[in-house]
Image (tube, rainbow, N blue to C red):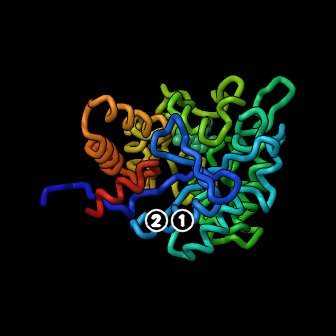
């Protein structure tokens, strides 16, 4: 009766990795228990999500290497892996599932950066925004419900919102990765989408310094003013203070991304006998809700849903 925070399977978003082919399941070595699935398998996972009461899946493509280029043009091919996965999920689940799609160029570029590079290898903001707009509209046309720009370029939320309106996609939401830190915890994700080996340097010229909290508030304020429907803090657990401050200051839906490295640490801790895996997981997920989150993106979503559903 005195419990202040309740979590249910409706608070979960399940990130899924898409790969080419049919009937393919490729385990991701650095994320034990997580696989890349071909489009048919993604549709099956989405059905599983519906059955478990998980309201939304987030899709990430492991683009074939010969389709990656300097300019990431595959991102706006209407028949790319992402668009095929969106359509397959919609065919399998209708409107029973929300489809969230990631906007950033890293799964499509030959250099693994989220944007376009100048001659010195610096990621250029405004030219990148123009390409992200095309990528977002492409995903909306394929049927995405929520566009989630994870690139951290300035001004992209407004540009994407305007393009969605012009294209008639009035009901497509934007969940902005507003406070995304240049984190060491993304390593296994980069293996999963195949960008890790390609990436030269780091992403510190556009992702945030882990030392900064006030800057996160400025980033969030900008994205809300530009038209974001909800905002995200990423990674999750090391940034609970940022989640709390965001909720207190802006009163908008705030989401946390429990990122790949966080997932891997739970698995490694459990395997090393630190504590029970399910107990470790559920305590961490509850902390996000206590800090003010409306929901959490987690690779543990199906396990957490099973536990929450009893
Ligand atoms: C791409 C993107 C990243 C993640 C989500 N979208 C990686 C990065 O910025 O390098 C990380 C997710 C995870 O680690 O689970 N821009």
Question: SS at mark 1?
Answer: helix
Q: Quadrant of residue 109?
A: top right
Label 1 close to label 2 by CB (< 8 Å)? yes
Instruction: Residue 9: give x, y in percent of width and height.
Output: 36, 61
Name the side, left or right, on which 221 lies relative to 269.
right
Name, please, the residue furthest toward the left: 1
For label 1, being within 8 Å of ligand 1 is answered: no
Question: Residue at 44% of width from left, 46% of height from top?
Answer: 246
Instruction: State which quarter of the image contains the C terminus.
Output: bottom left
Instruction: Residue 122: give x, y in percent of width and height.
Output: 77, 28
Name, please, the residue furthest toward the right: 119
- In the image, residue 136 sits, relative to residue 122, either above or below, namely below
Q: For mark 1, what is the residue?
A: 44
Instruction: State which quarter of the image contains the N terminus.
Output: bottom left
Ligand 1: quadrant of the figure: top right
Question: Residue at 75% of width from left, 61% of height from top?
Answer: 138
């Amino acid at each position: 009766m005195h419990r202040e925070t309740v979590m249910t399977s409706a608070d979960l978003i399940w990130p899924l990795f898409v790969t080419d082919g049919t009937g393919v399941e490729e385990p991701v070595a650095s994320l034990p228990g997580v696989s890349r699935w071909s489009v048919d398998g993604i549709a099956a996972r989405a059905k599983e999500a519906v059955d478990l009461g998980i309201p939304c899946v987030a899709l990430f493509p492991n683009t074939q290497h010969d389709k990656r280029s300097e300019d990431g043009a595959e991102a706006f091919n209407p028949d790319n892996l992402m668009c095929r996965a969106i359509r397959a999920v919609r065919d399998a689940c209708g409107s029973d599932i929300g489809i969230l799609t990631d906007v950033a160029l890293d799964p499509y570029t030959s250099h693994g950066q989220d944007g376009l590079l100048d001659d010195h290898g610096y990621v250029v903001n405004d030219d990148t925004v123009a390409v992200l707009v095309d990528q977002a509209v492409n995903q909306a046309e394929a049927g995405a419900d929520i566009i989630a720009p994870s690139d951290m370029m300035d001004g992209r939320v407004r540009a994407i919102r305007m393009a969605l309106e012009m294209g008639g996609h009035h009901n497509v939401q934007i969940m902005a990765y507003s406070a995304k830190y240049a984190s060491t915890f993304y390593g296994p994700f980069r293996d999963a989408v195949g960008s890790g080996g390609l990436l030269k340097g780091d992403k510190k010229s556009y992702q945030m310094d882990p030392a900064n909290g006030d800057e996160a508030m400025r980033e969030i304020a900008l994205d809300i003013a530009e038209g974001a429907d909800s905002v995200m803090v990423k990674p999750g657990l090391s940034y609970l203070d940022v989640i709390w401050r965001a909720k207190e200051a802006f009163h908008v839906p705030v989401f946390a991304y429990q990122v790949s490295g966080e997932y891997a640490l739970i698995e490694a801790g459990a395997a090393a006998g630190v504590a029970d895996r399910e107990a470790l997981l559920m305590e961490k997920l509850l902390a996000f809700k206590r800090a003010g989150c409306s929901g959490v993106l987690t690779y543990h979503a199906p396990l957490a849903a099973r536990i929450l559903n009893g």
